[in-house]
Amino acid sequence: MDLLFDAAKDSAEVEIPPGWGQGRATFGGTIGGLLQARSLGEWDLAPATLRAVTTSFVAPANAGPARLETLLLRQGSSATQTEVRLWQTDPKTGQETVRALQLSSYGAPRESSVEVAAPRATVPETEGRFAVPHLPGLTPDFLAQIELTPVTGGMSFSGADSGDITGFMRYRTAPAAMTLPHFLCLVDGWPPATGSLLKAPAAMSTLSWTVEILAEPTGAADQFWWYEVATDAAHDGYAHTHATVFTRAGDPVAISRQTISIFA
């Protein structure tokens, strides 16, 4: 993943590696981090200025060659808006199609009379808790790379009474550094919270994913992050969730919102 994100900074042509599968597609967090790495590198933007990023998963992105198309929508005195599209060739038709699209909003800090602090979290201890194992053929491939440790709520297809989950997450093997693309990839590690309400396995996929950055993610590459997610609504085969990511000390870092397609 380090090599993938580094390559995306300098080139529009990348090779998505195997080992990050999620169903029939590459794990959405990897795609989100890849597109962000390209945006930061193409225009030499400061990671600390990212305010919000929205990723639309148009079609399954697969391991293999991909082309990243960039567009600078606007660059003002303080705010910059960018777009990055991921293209891949369909092996059946031979046509190149868009697989994912990301819109990013960056804003340089400025003086303001408005100051509202996001709520902090009370984070429990990690000792004595068990991480979700990676079981080849049973759990998604990317869980060999990302460690999830549930604390409250049910996992996917457990028939839980609530679509709310809390837990810890981190990389099983720490990357070279906790960059913004690495952080975005990790944030998407938890399965759709609404899936815990299902009593049997069913297909689910993220339609759109927005992350709002409250503070620049920094610190050790192998650190734990605390995750709290709630299901806001679910109807007509779609669900809406929002999550907050905190440091181990309980400081809020990001808000993650998803619209999820549920085929059950």
Image (cartoon, rainbow, N blue to C red):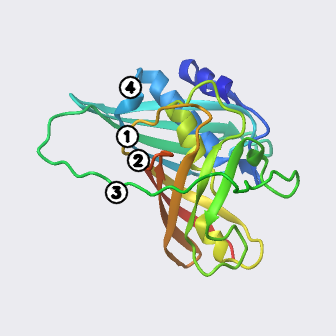
Where does the image place residue 169, in percent across and percent down from the top left?
A: 62, 48
Number of disc labels: 4
Residue 46's tag is 4
Residue 98 in view, yes or no? no
Q: Nearer the viewer, residue 252 or 33?
A: 252
Where does the image place residue 120, in percent across and percent down from the top left?
A: 38, 54
Q: Nearer the viewer, mark 4 or mark 1?
A: 1
Q: Is residue 152 left or right of residue 209?
A: right
The residue labelled by disc 1 is 215
- Contact between labelled residues 2 and 4, with CB atoms less than 8 Å apart: no
* CA distance separating discs 2 and 1: 9 Å
Mark closest to the chain's N terminus, 2 or 3: 3
- Contact between labelled residues 1 and 2, with CB atoms less than 8 Å apart: yes
Please give the name of the residue rendered at 65% of the width and 26% of the height, measured from the top-left corner: 2
* CA distance separating discs 4 and 1: 13 Å
The residue labelled by disc 3 is 119
Please give the name of the residue rendered at 62% of the width and 62% of the height, measured from the top-left corner: 151
- Dot 4: element: loop
* CA distance separating discs 4 and 2: 22 Å
Q: Label 3 is placed on what type of residue?
A: Pro
Q: Nearer the viewer, mark 2 or mark 1?
A: 2
Please give the name of the residue rendered at 64% of the width and 77% of the height, measured from the top-left corner: 197
Q: Nearer the viewer, mark 3 or mark 4?
A: 3
The residue labelled by disc 2 is 251
Q: Label 1 is placed on what type of residue?
A: Ala
Q: Nearer the viewer, residue 207 or 69?
A: 207
Task: Classify mark 3: residues with Cα within 10 Å, few (<14), some (14-19) or many (20+).
Answer: few
